Amino acid sequence: KIIIKTNTTLLFLEYPTPWITCPSDITVTLAQNRSEHNITGMLEDPKSNVQNIQVYQEKYRGQMIFPYGSTILTYVASNEIGVTANCSTYIKVRGKFVVRT
């Protein structure tokens, strides 16, 4: 809650406490002779009561191709006054890793 007082007006502004629900974790198996997996269509958007949502690791923002191993995507929702909520989704790419030469 923010209170703004001017000479003639007292204004109360309320901002919602953010909440966020992450997409479900994803586990996939590498195709033969591959070192990464495309998860297009598998990763849903997070749900939140605020519009400002950032995703970290930034290098995977908007990307749907993930390397062998585990990657954690952390989503952070923030309201207009900087209060945040966060959650994480795990992307696990398993299988026989192939080194490309």
Image (cartoon, grey):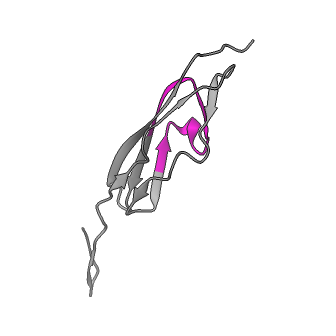
Horizontal side of residue 23 vs 61, given as left or right? left
Camera-side residue: 64 or 34?
Answer: 34
Q: Is residue 71 magenta?
A: yes
Q: Which residues are magenta?
A: 54-73
Residue in the image at 31% along x and 67% along y: 15
Tell me the quarter of the picture where residue 47 sits.
bottom left
- Compared to residue 92, the image places residue 56 above or below, namely below
- Give x and y (percent) for residue 12: 25, 77
Q: Residue furthest bottom?
A: 8
* Residue 83 percent location from the top left of the image: 32, 55
Question: Could you tell me which quadrant the C terminus lies in?
Answer: top right
From the top left corner, tell me how far across and down residue 1 is, in percent: 24, 68
Q: In the displayed orientation, state which residue is furthest to the right.
A: 101
Q: Quadrant of residue 78?
A: bottom left
Residue 97 is one of the magenta-drawn residues: no
- Figure check: 86 above or below 59: below
Residue depicted at x 28% and y 71%: 14
* 94 left or right, relative to 22: right
Residue beneath the point at 63% across and 27% down:
36
Left or right of 8? Residue 60 is right
Q: How many marks?
A: 0
State the residue in front, 82 or 24. Answer: 24
Q: Residue at x 46, y 53 (%)?
A: 53
Give the percent coordinates (x, y) of residue 79.
37, 60
Of the pair 6 and 64, the residue shown nearer to us: 64
Using the image, determine if residue 14 lies above or below residue 27: below
From the viewer's perspective, is 100 left or right of 64?
Answer: right
